[in-house]
Image (spheres, rainbow, N blue to C red):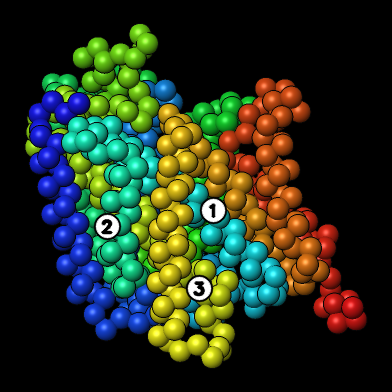
Amino acid sequence: MLAHIDPRLIITVVLIYFIALLIVAYYTSRQSDNDTFFIGNKKSNWLLVAFGMIGTSLSGVTFISVPGTVGASAFGYFQIVLGYFLGYFVVAFVLLPLYYRLQLTSIYTYLLQRLGEISYKTGASFFILSRTLGATGRLFIAINVLQLFVFQYVGMSFIMSTFLILVMILLYTIRGGVKTIVWTDTLQTIFMLLGLVTCLIFIIQQLGLTFTEALFAFNDAGYTKVFNFDPLHKGFFLKSIIGGALTTLTMTGLDQEMMQKNISVRTLGDSQKNMLSFSIVLVIVNFLFLMLGAALALYAIKNNLLVEGKPLSGDNLFPTVALQHAPGIVSLIFIIGLISALFPSADGALTALTSSTCIDLLDFNKRTNKSEQQKKSIRIKVHLAFTLLFFILVLLFKWIDDKSIIDLILKIASFTYGPLLGLFAFGMITNKKVNEPLVPLVCILSPILCFIFDKYASKIIAGYTCGLEILLINGTITFIGLCIISLTHKEKSAA
């Protein structure tokens, strides 16, 4: 329970925060149309996009889970962050030029132009599945923390908390779409970073250390170890770095939510500047989160915060210290930081999923007899449907209640983004066509085979455990499967 601050005050602050987002949404969504919702009329400022993407990329997973992993795995997560950094260069100089050259609104339209209608629909469907599961998993983390430490003490159930938060997100995204989110994500990133820095400074001060002394203390405790050199371990550095790069390539470069903001920037050059500057800042911010995790781990030991005789760790460590052992102002800043991490994990996803469904599955890009007003009506209904789906899935994650959900989210991504990686790689590396009716079969079989391999890897290869490299294996199997069903141009024309 909160020791230093009235939960009703926190709810008041959340409401004020939400009203501020509504004001931003009102001014950014005036005279908005479908083009505004989907790509911000191609007028987004690259600096705002870059800064706002930090909040979208980090979300509640980083804010809560990453600090909680340090006690068990030190700075091992930074291996993945280094992989992320490499992946952003591929996105900036390989994928963005392709998207701008083809003037895409949905990036999956590339699959339509390159491979055909069924491949296009399959790729978009896998994105919708992947982003829906990932976004709701991230959303669950933040709502669950707010429920455990705040909302339950004012009589709100988890179901009601989830419902109200999703209604708030719906209200400020439903009109302005990308144009609104570019601005709201910037505001939310500011508050999230404020929460991070404030809590880090507070914990270091409570340890009685200067910043430099804290670094030495983290090292002496063994928390600064980054690289794992055991090739059979799932955290082996090559697995982590390659897996991190591929995660960036798929979850950013092949993800409509992330790319929707990038291609809303006016020129390719500005979009590339956005991506590169964002990648540098993201490395620094992730390192600060790991430092915070090391400080929290030392604080838990020093103050004898135990669970079953062991120092508290995992997703509950950061909120427990911030809300039960910090002064009221720090607790309040933590909550603001948390909701600032919560909203970008859902608002951008709702917008991107609505966009992909309308453009890719409902064919908004094709000439139809529907007016712009009719399309807008359909878009709003799709947006409402995804909000309802988010509500159901967050409740499902609550039922599962995994104690460290970051691993679960990354695992889900490895299985669901692999087919996208294989589809785009096949389209960009080869000049072959495919027997299209078999494409969905290949893309479904690939994750199934990877799931089986992941489950029995230690028996197939003695002592081996799968890490993020399962994404590469998944993409490779999809690529090979597409090669098997591929036809040359000549064979296709003769068929």
Which of the 4 image quadrants contains residue 36? Answer: bottom left
Q: Which residue is mark 1?
A: 130
Relative to 70, is 254 above or below?
A: below
Mark 3 burial class by Cα count in 10 Å: few <14, some 14-19, many 20+ = many
Q: Nearer the viewer, mark 2 or mark 1?
A: 2
Q: What element does badge 2 sit on?
A: helix
Quadrant containing the C terminus in the rendered view: bottom right
Q: Is residue 158 visible?
A: yes
Which residue is at the front of the view, 259 or 367?
367
Q: Nearer the viewer, mark 3 or mark 1?
A: 3
Q: Position of residue 429 (x, y in %)?
A: 69, 66
Please name the residue shown 31% across and 73% down the image: 175
Q: Position of residue 270 (x, y in %)?
A: 36, 73
Looking at the image, residue 390 sits to the left or right of residue 174; the answer is right
Mark 2–mark 1 CB contact (< 8 Å): no
As shown in the figure, which amino acid type bears the numbered disc 1?
Answer: Ser
Which of the 4 image quadrants contains residue 298? Answer: top left
Q: Position of residue 240 (x, y in %)?
A: 53, 39
Q: Which mark is residue 172?
A: none
Which of the 4 image quadrants contains residue 452? Answer: top right
Q: Earlier in the sequence, mark 3 or mark 2?
A: 2
Q: Position of residue 466 (x, y in %)?
A: 62, 34
Q: Which residue is mark 3?
A: 358
Q: Earlier in the sequence, mark 3 or mark 1?
A: 1
Q: Which residue is mark 2?
A: 168
Looking at the image, residue 316 sits to the left or right of residue 81; the answer is left
Looking at the image, residue 137 sits to the left or right of residue 52; the answer is right
Which residue is at the front of the view, 66 or 390?
390
